[in-house]
Image (spheres, grey):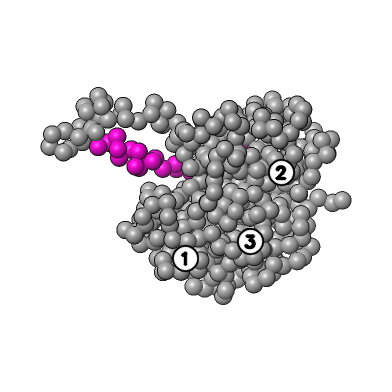
Amino acid sequence: MSPRRVVITGIGLATPVGIGAEHVWNALLESKCGVRRLTAFDPSGFESQVGGEIDALVMKNYVPRSYLKSTKVMARDIEIAVAAAYEAAKDAGLRTKCIIDRGEAQGPPNFHVTRFGANIGAGLICADLTELAGALATAVDESGRFSLRKWGSEGMNNLTPLWLLKFLPNMLSCHVTIVHDAQAPSNTITCGEASSHLAIGEAFRTIARGAADVCICGGAESKVNPMGLMRQQLLKRLTTRCNDRPEQACRPFDLDRAGTVISEGGGLLILEELEHARQRGARIYCEVTGFGASNNTHSWSEPHPEGAGIALAIRKAMDDAGLKPEEVDLVVACGVGTVAHDLSEARGIRAALSTRGSAVHVLAIKGSLGNSGAGSGAIDLGIAALCLSKGMVPPARNADRIDPECGLRVVTGQPLKTAIRNVVSTAYALSGGQNAALVLKRMEA
């Protein structure tokens, strides 16, 4: 039996330049920047003091009134995922439990809830350090040292009994599936910046083989916390040159790039079996036609100098889609802005696409958004789907002089209006070595 065709019918984005697909799209067209000096905590003790933060994320706007109490046990990563899920379901015209309970749709669900699945990428969720420190302060002995005995008898009692549930990676998909009543297979993938692509690839396979008709998939993460910033600082991945000009900090593939920028954000997409989408009259952005994944065995923390793993993932995705290099019209790159990772990715793209690698247009959006880890890939894919649907490519911010060694044709300056039929989107984990690629195709009238 031939695999079932899978399409994208909903896009939900939550980013530092806006919430909602159209808001983010318009901000990128205007080259707006969401990177600024960090305000969530005092960053003055860090070498890098800038990042991408989401404003106006008010949870009552994204869940039914009956679920508001549960938002108290949501870490920031979970909040971002829940917001993106609401935006995706609403954009797709799905009458989910959340949409109905909020009074924004009438009638029963327009799909079978037992055929509605979820695959969501998550990162390392940072504990609330203020809350934890307050509890730890009550567990010191007379000499001022931490006492495990006092922690057991007094300290931990100052944490809510549900405290741990705020910080488990699977709680993103847990809350999303409960709020929207998604009862088909649900999975969590935690593979750094590759998480969203791997989650969407799994959703693609789940629908193609007939285990679900609809899947909500993507990822979300907030690195905007002291631990998230410190991890990247210790790994020497952050730019430290732009604390006084944060809007110029992240420079994907630029000759003057000097490191990435932490951020928070996420995207969830609605993937749907083609005939199921047609039967309910859904708007279709594009078709998902190929998925590939690989692993970088060169190093757990450093990219392969020639991007071998990225090239392999792209080739697998293109083979899966039956796509030739000359048929690729746009590459959506990960483009985090570090010298080594950008060069590795560029070489991997060029190796996979052969002579087409230096000629095909490239979209790189992290100059506007920063790197939101597990959430970044789904944002890339949401914008890729909009590029196919609208026949336009937003320009890369801060990519003023493309590094000749990268050799990519990054779209810069002004939005590019062009016919796009096939898009290849890449992602890789900065730590761990996972690589993934997806192929999206324009739906013919």
Check residue 246 in the rendering and tell me which mark sits there, or answer none: 1
Which amino acid does the dot numbered 2 rest on? Asp
Mark closest to the chain's N terminus, 1 or 2: 2
Binning the other alpha carbons within 10 Å of mark 1 as few (below 14), some (14 to 19) or many (20 upward) gives: many
In terms of depth relative to the viewer, which is nearer, 64 or 1?
Answer: 64
Which residue is labeled 3 in the image? 28
Q: Position of residue 376 (x, y in %)?
A: 56, 51
Q: Amino acid at mark 3?
A: Leu
Image location (x, y in percent) of residue 309: 56, 54
Between disc 3 and disc 2, whose residue precedes?
A: 3
Which residue is disc 2 drawn over?
A: 91
Task: Please tell me which residue lies in front, 420 or 267.
Answer: 267
Residue nearest the observer in this picture, 233 or 29: 29
Q: Quadrant of the N terminus?
A: top right
The magenta region covers: 119-137
Q: Tell whether 368 sits left or right of 144.
A: right
Q: Which x, y percent locates residue 345? A: 56, 60
